Image (cartoon, rainbow, N blue to C red):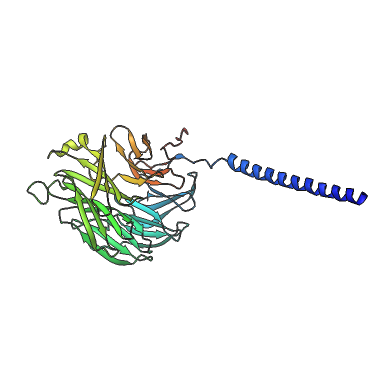
Amino acid sequence: MKLQVDHKMKTLDVIVIAILIIFNGCSNESNELDQNIDTDPEPIITFEKDVNNVKSAVRQTKDGGYIVAGGLGGQAWLLKLDKYGEEEWQNTYTLGDFGYTRSVVQTMDGGYLYAGAEGILKADSNGNEMWKNISRTKGAYPFYEDAIEHSSGDIYAVGGPGGGQAQFVKFNANGSVLARRWYGSKCEDDIFRSIIESNDGKLVVVGEKSHGNQSYDCAFNFMYYKDFWILKLRKNGGVIWEKTYGGPYMEKADDIVALEDGGYAVVGDKCAHGYDIFRCSAVAKVVCLKLDENGDLMEELSWSGLNFSERLPYFSITTTSEGGLAWTAEHKNKGTWIHKWGPNEETVTIYGDGFGGFDINKTMDGGFIIGTWGGTILKTDSELYYDENTDEE
């Protein structure tokens, strides 16, 4: 009997231990779930930073920081910021900084590509100059407005005018010219303002094309008689399709972005001046076109209140994290003008410091990084909120 009792006691002990193990395991799993549920998401960092440099182009970098392109002492200049907007390094280069525009992108090897009116250069990940190209075939300078690194590794820059025409240049990764082409008429200044890789690996460029004034093919006040100009190009510059949009007066495209569901959005300005060009300060509008993959118009939207500046390109557009769009420009009374909208989000408009918009790009956290004409960099959240710099001098 004693043996039987011991056996039953041992069996009971085993059952109790098993129950404790199971309960403890469930408790640990519950604690882990509780910990996961209680973990707060990383807060979105926003800031306002004066970089003391006008016409600031800016992009987010792979490490979560930002690269800012400007000019300093007449030379091209890059500033690297961390994710908090604090300076990591800055450098100037042996490339001049003439003109109104410049662009910057981070390349696949971690370096940086800078393009401006006087040429194009490549810097390494620490900001050291690697090469530059200032070659030209028409005009005093290359007059580049924008540049990208294609997924193929080749580099493309666009701009103009040269002899009245827009320019397209293809470089290899070492900065040697592989192709240079010219497009448009000879009416003073047909210009390409922006280039992107298309959704199928080709290229799409936008800009402004002269259409003349009534019976005059080349108008005297040529910058007031233009159309939105959109082209899809092969990787060697061959034209796949070409479209213009506008009426008898002035419409100019300045930036383009590819849409996630196909097609493109283009931003620029419009002035229906009725042959009185001095009316533009009162009637100019921001215009956004949505195009399908063939460049055909799907939607046109416009906003009144634009501060009109002759020849100055200060519009930029990007997509939002919810599939919408956001642009920046200059409001005539309220400064930097930022607007976002979309079918899956609230429409938001803000007016910030910085004298006009110059560049806007979506960031990894769903917010935006914005460069302005006045030298202020704005990092916002998805609803365009940002922490204002309240430091007193």
Q: Position of residue 145 (x, y in %)?
A: 29, 53
Does 83 sit left or right of 52 as displayed? Answer: right
Point out residue 256 in the picture as x, y percentages from the top left corner: 30, 50
Query: In percent of the image, x 61 and y 43: which residue is there?
Result: 33
- As drawn, which residue projects farthest toward the left? 215
Name the outermost residue toward the right: 2
212 left or right, relative to 251:
left
Where residue 135 sits: x, y (%)?
Answer: 29, 63
Residue 106 is situated, as x and y percent measured from the top left of the image, at 42, 56
Nearest the camera: 349 or 3?
3
Report the label total: 0
The answer to whether residue 263 of the structure is visible from this angle is yes
Is 95 or 190 nearer to us in this picture?
A: 190
Q: Is residue 252 left or right of 59 when viewed as pictured?
A: left
- Seen as rendered, the residue at the extreme front is 1
- Is residue 72 in sight in this rendering? no
Is 251 in front, or is 58? Answer: 251
Residue 337: quarter of image: top left
Relative to 146, residue 174 above or below? below
Q: Image point 24% across, 42% down: which residue?
A: 269
